């Protein structure tokens, strides 16, 4: 299973080079992770309410072609790895069918105190739902 | 009393018009409010730890001249109004001695629950320090 | 005529107070101006290509209620003033039918050199289209 | 040679998890690249004026420990690879002497048209200065 979200590039997301600033792509990844969690039936909002969060441990982006103001992009996200301690999402961004960006984000499972938590053990229903998407 | 902070414009703060995006100025205002609170002897960090926060109720900016990538700017901030329910800061931004932006932010005093709180009554020491700066 | 856009709040748009940071609202205003220009039949992209830009001269926001991560908001925009030298847009933001934010942005008409230009005289077709929306 | 810049964390850079959002680190990297170019004697501003730009091809960040509002951080940057077509910078971020983040950015040398350019051949003085820092 993967999720796709539609992004329309905002003016504020460009920089003086005339194209989208590279720091914006992780924000689009994140937006699509939110869509993914809703499509899966357990929103990230509800996960946070239950005390489960997933801060980033690692981020990787490859910029293949630039994106411009007012472009309509498709961001695709899926789970590429899952363990009781970590979760990894992978991403592809398309502009008119052409792949312009790829990336992944690795996250740690943590509780409200930002300390590591075993997702499989402490949130088995969430863990199973995540596994079923793979 | 006023505080001044030095800002060096970041590339990511520009947009495709080649100048700083207008949404960045309130972030510089906020940075200078933090400096102000530290100069005053009660940091905003310590205020938040005691359960006092000041979300924005109103924002106003006037853009007189543009700012460019790598410009060194001076942001000046001071308290322009203070009541038990509200606090207003005013700002001036200078580039090489020339005024390029003015603004103000009006804030509500709220507690951790984001509900209004009487600052004068519930945090008299903070209220007095703020008053002394005016 | 007014335009409305749907915004889903991004995680990155929140701050440690747990709500949307105040500097984000102008970015949503701008996104909705872009939609407005497209609905009107002259996109801002095409205006810039013809050498017409509209940097901000003034920004005003009133924050009535907070917005939260993953909220779906409706941003409404319309032209509230138009002269050969200036254009003003007004905004209202709604969350589940409740007004949570209002604002306006005043812009100068400038050419590619960022110098003032008379929009009515130099871009009469654009000026007329804008007028027809009022 | 490496350059270091001092960053004081802005409130707007935090998110509702209470810590700095991961998309902010690349912006700090970039700020420190600017400092690096100035220390080296050829500012990025002057490079852009001569028609040389370096958009990102790849970004990688590892988040070791979180950063908080108002933290004072040290960002260190140096050139880790240099070819006529590409340049790679590496970064380390420290909080009170403790390493909290590492990363690298890979850039393409491009001209004003965003097309690849041979830096060594077309900008030999810049290329040599960069090489001398390694």
Image (cartoon, coloured by chain):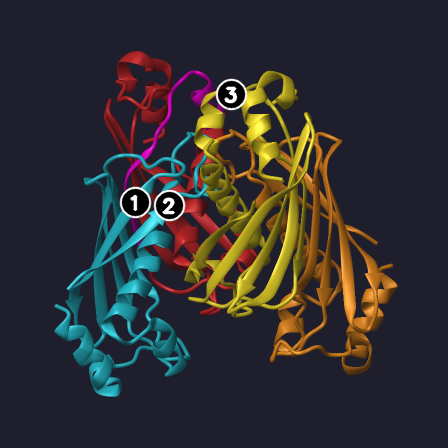
Chain colours: A cyan, B orange, C yellow, D red
Q: Nearer the viewer, residue C11 or C72?
A: C72
Q: Does the CB distance between marks 1 and 2 fall below 8 Å? A: yes
**Chain of the residue on which disc 3 is drawn:** C
Where is residue C87, by image quadrant? top right
Measure the C-alpha gap from mark 1 to mark 2. Answer: 6 Å
The answer to whether one can see residue D43 in this image is no
Under circle 1, the secondary element is strand
- Which x, y percent locates residue A9? 39, 43
Look at 50% across and 42% down and name the residue there. Answer: C36
**Residue that mark 3 sits on:** C51
Task: Determine if the magenta segment contains residue D57.
Answer: yes
Q: How many marks?
A: 3
Q: Nearer the viewer, residue A115 or A88?
A: A88
Q: Does the CB distance between marks 1 and 3 fall below 8 Å? A: no
**Residue that mark 1 sits on:** A73
- Which x, y percent locates residue C42? 47, 31
């Amino acid at each position: 299973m993967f999720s796709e979200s539609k992004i329309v590039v905002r003016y504020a997301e460009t920089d003086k080079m005339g194209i989208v600033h590279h720091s914006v792509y992780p924000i689009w990844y994140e937006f699509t992770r939110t869509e993914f969690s809703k499509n899966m039936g357990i929103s990230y909002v509800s996960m946070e309410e239950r005390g489960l969060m997933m801060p980033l441990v690692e981020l990787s982006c490859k910029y293949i072609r630039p994106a411009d103001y007012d472009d309509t992009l498709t961001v695709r996200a899926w789970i590429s790895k899952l363990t009781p301690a970590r979760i990894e999402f992978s991403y592809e961004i398309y502009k008119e069918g052409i792949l312009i960006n790829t990336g992944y984000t690795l996250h740690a499972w943590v509780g409200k105190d930002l300390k590591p938590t075993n997702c499989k053990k402490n949130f088995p229903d969430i863990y199973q739902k995540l596994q079923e998407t793979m």
